[in-house]
Image (tube, grey):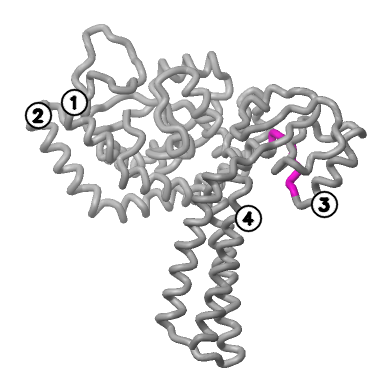
Amino acid sequence: MWRHIYINAGANTLAMLGAARTARVGRLDRQIAGALTVTIMAHGAVAFLTLAFRFYYSNQLMLLAAGVSVASSFLVLAVARSFHQPRAALIGPWHPIASELRVAYDHLATPVSDLRGYDLVLTTSAEPADGWTVALTQTMMAGKPVRHVAEYIEEEQGIVSIEHFTLDHLPLGGLTSYQTRKRLLDVGLVVLAAPVALPLLVLGACGIWATMGRPVLFVQSRVGLGGKVFRMYKLRTMRPAAPGAGESATGRNDLRVTRLGNWLRRFRIDELPQLWNVLKGDMSIIGPRPEQPLLTEEYCRRLPAFAYRSLVRPGITGWAQVRAGYASDLEETRVKLAYDLYYLKNFSYALDLQIILRTASTLLTGGGVR
């Protein structure tokens, strides 16, 4: 029994060391995946050794050890992230895309002899000047990542540069076939969600009718796939706008939102009628959030890449929604657009699953409400 305890303790130690190592650079979700991978490998090795050499083992003890290992790894990851703030070296001529970086960095325009004091090195050109060769070689031999700044921003921050985005970046053929398969999944998910969504809809509608009267639903024109305008449905959460008021995005702490409306928005219950839009084919479960026609026209004029969003069905939730929340002005819309374009370029079932998990977390915590 003690031998089994010692082996599991060793596996736990390896898992925690792996978690500490993954905390140095990269996105949180990838760090979590890395920590889990190390934990699974460590305890997989324990299971193999136990069976191969016929050591004493207890199913309860093995499960307990694995659970403790996962919890310990996450704790180590959290502590390591709080104590270690990665720093990058940005080498080469200044490039505007570097303004999107969310990691601390030093810009080094001229070659230096050693870069190993940095956690990672980012280049602004595909082929750095010859003067960087020795330092870059030493950095790679030390196991430090060397990457192009645009590649790093896209892969680690989940956004793309709006200014440098073109139609050539989109896998249009794959996008079309993926949307077809995704349509079947959308219908299936709506059917599965119906037993939970319908009672919540009824309760929300009764609350609105009792506090604000009719109508219960808020219906508004939005721009969808291919620029087609459709009628989107929501539970009403706001008082009517003043006569003659034009279209506008809802601002933070908007006084038009009622107390009940704020609660419905907090847990996204007001969005449930859009499941009908999904069944009709106007929307998808996941995709860029649809905008009003006049706002879409304005955004396309000031942010030309905004028009690419109409290449897919708009969604109830999306990559921009879970990463950046709501947008109430042009700058926030620009940030969300960078996430939307990332989704269009990197669509996959894995990314959709990540969006669903992040959305579930938001629903449970009630975060991101306006």
Residue at 67%, 35% in the rendered image? 169
Q: What residue did someone put label 3 on? A: 141
Q: Disc 1 or disc 2, which is closer to the eye?
A: 1
Q: Secondary structure at mark 4?
A: helix
* Amino acid type indicated by mark 2: Thr
Vertical placement of 112 versus 5: above or below?
above
| Residue 291 in the image, given as x and y percentages of width and height | 41, 25
Which label was assigned to residue 211?
2
Q: Are marks 1 and 3 in contact (CB under 8 Å)?
A: no
Is 266 inside the magenta-drawn segment? no
Which residue occupies the foreground of this view, 164 or 44? 44
Residues at marks 4 and 1, CA–CA distance in whole angstroms: 48 Å
Residues at marks 2 and 3, CA–CA distance in whole angstroms: 67 Å
Q: Earlier in the sequence, mark 4 or mark 3?
A: 4
Residues at marks 4 and 3, CA–CA distance in whole angstroms: 17 Å
Vertical placement of 40 versus 95: above or below?
below
Span shown in magenta: 144-150
Query: From the viewer's perspective, is 316 left or right of 127?
Result: left
* Amino acid type indicated by mark 3: Met
* Amino acid type indicated by mark 4: Arg
Residues at marks 1 and 3, CA–CA distance in whole angstroms: 60 Å
Structural crowding at the residue carrying mark 3, measured as other residues with C-alpha within 10 Å and reported as few (<14), some (14–19) or many (≥20): few
Q: Secondary structure at mark 3?
A: helix
